Amino acid sequence: MPSATTSERGAAPLRSAIIGTGGIAHAHAGAIAGLAPRIEVVAVADVDRDRAEAFALRHSPQASVYASADELLAAETLDLVHVCTPPQTHVPLAIAAMRAGVPVLVEKPTALSLAEADELAAVSAETGVPVLTVYQHRFGPAAQRLLRLFAEGALGRAMVATCETQWYRGPEYFDLPWRGRWHVEGGGPTMGHGIHQFDLLLAVLGPWSRVSAFAARQKLPTDTEDVSVAVAEFDNGALATIVNSIVSPRESSRLRFDFDCATVEVEHLYGYADGDWTFTPARGHEELASLWHASDSPETTSHRSQIEAIVTALEEGRDPGVGIADARRTLEFAAATYASAFRGVPIRAGQITPDDPFATAMDGGAVPWAPVKEPIGAGA
């Protein structure tokens, strides 16, 4: 059912629902609890009803419990739906929410292909309902400060950047049947792990123009890559290196931006605090240090920072972030990484057209380590 308008709702909390009550759903529920009384969970749904009931009891005992998203959307009046299900279900669930008139926040990846992202954009345009993606690293105070200072011109021209997501996952991580499979997860660390980091890179540097990349399956029992390395050129002339790995024993997430007037960098693991960032003015620009105004708060970036920004935008009648246009640009960067790695050529922005195999699947049917299928009748 369509969400209520602000005037109809008055000062009552925003009504949210969570579809899918697995691991990541707990982060959403915790963030919502921390934002009370501005927003509350009024309903949850999961194909495993017992799990849904246990989840509701833990996080929101008053919430109604449903065995399907369709039942939930038909019964509830909502302001926001959180899709926390495995990746291959994101698009149909997001479309169902939009057609019910409810803004939807989807866990990454938004979609498994550019074709699916374009379908989401079309439904959003048709219904006038936003579809949003969880990219919480954009919403930490330091990232917001960096975005503002760069936009204002205080840092000068962007020249060089480094983006590294070097994590470690053992074989047991892939015991879940949907992990490490192109058709249900979309890809390896490029899609499922490093995407948060390079989304922030793209948010800061703006449109990218060209990507040249490599990808490999170094050791893990997956269909997808476990490492990718890319070099990217941006419309503003900046150059960046991007590493996505899940075979790195010393885990680290690192971003570094070298501007004309300063270097801004952060190293963290799964979320950063203000204290994880350093700001180094170039010689002759020491006065810029006073603009960085970092706090000593130990709070790290989490779902709460983005959901709070979404709640504020909904309360004020503004478009919340991160919308489908930005999410698609990040997804196109992932697709270009795979296309470049598997074709062995640089890929330009916009080059992956709707008739390109990499528009409909991130592997593009070109994974070099995929088993070769014998023709029908071979060996007969």
Image (cartoon, rainbow, N blue to C red):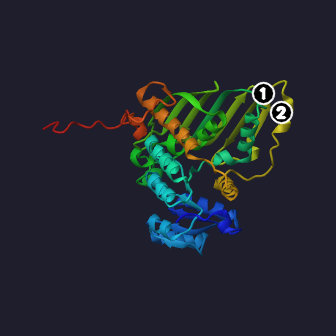
- Helix, strand, or loop for circle 1? loop
The x and y percentages for residue 3 are 58, 63
Q: Amino acid at mark 2?
A: Leu
Location of mark 1 (residue): 261
Q: Does 262 sit left or right of 48 as displayed?
A: right
Q: Are marks 1 and 2 in contact (CB under 8 Å)?
A: yes
Q: Amino acid at mark 1?
A: Cys
Q: Residue at x 46, y 71 (%)?
A: 49
**Gap between marks 1 and 2 measured at Cα:** 8 Å
Q: Is residue 297 above or below residue 210?
A: below
Q: Residue at x 49, y 65 (%)?
A: 73
Q: Tell which circle, 1 or 2, labels the residue nearer the N-terminal end.
A: 1
Location of mark 2 (residue): 288
Label 2: how many Cα within 10 Å (few below 14, some 14–19, many 20+): some
In the rendered image, is residue 187 in sight? yes
- Helix, strand, or loop for circle 2? helix
The x and y percentages for residue 179 are 44, 50
Q: Residue at x 69, y 32 (%)?
A: 257
Tell me which corner region of the image, top left, top right, bottom left or bottom right, holds residue 165: top right
Which label is found at residue 346? none
Q: Does 50 sit left or right of 130 as displayed?
A: left
Q: Which of the image's four quarters has the C terminus? A: top left
Label 1: how many Cα within 10 Å (few below 14, some 14–19, many 20+): many
Q: Residue at x 66, y 45 (%)?
A: 138
Q: Nearer the viewer, residue 269 or 127?
A: 127
In the rendered image, is residue 110 in sight? no
Q: Is residue 199 above or below residue 340?
A: below
Q: Nearer the viewer, residue 46 or 222?
A: 46
Tell me which corner region of the image, top left, top right, bottom left or bottom right, holds residue 220: top left
Q: Does 276 sit left or right of 15 as displayed?
A: right
The x and y percentages for residue 191 are 50, 43
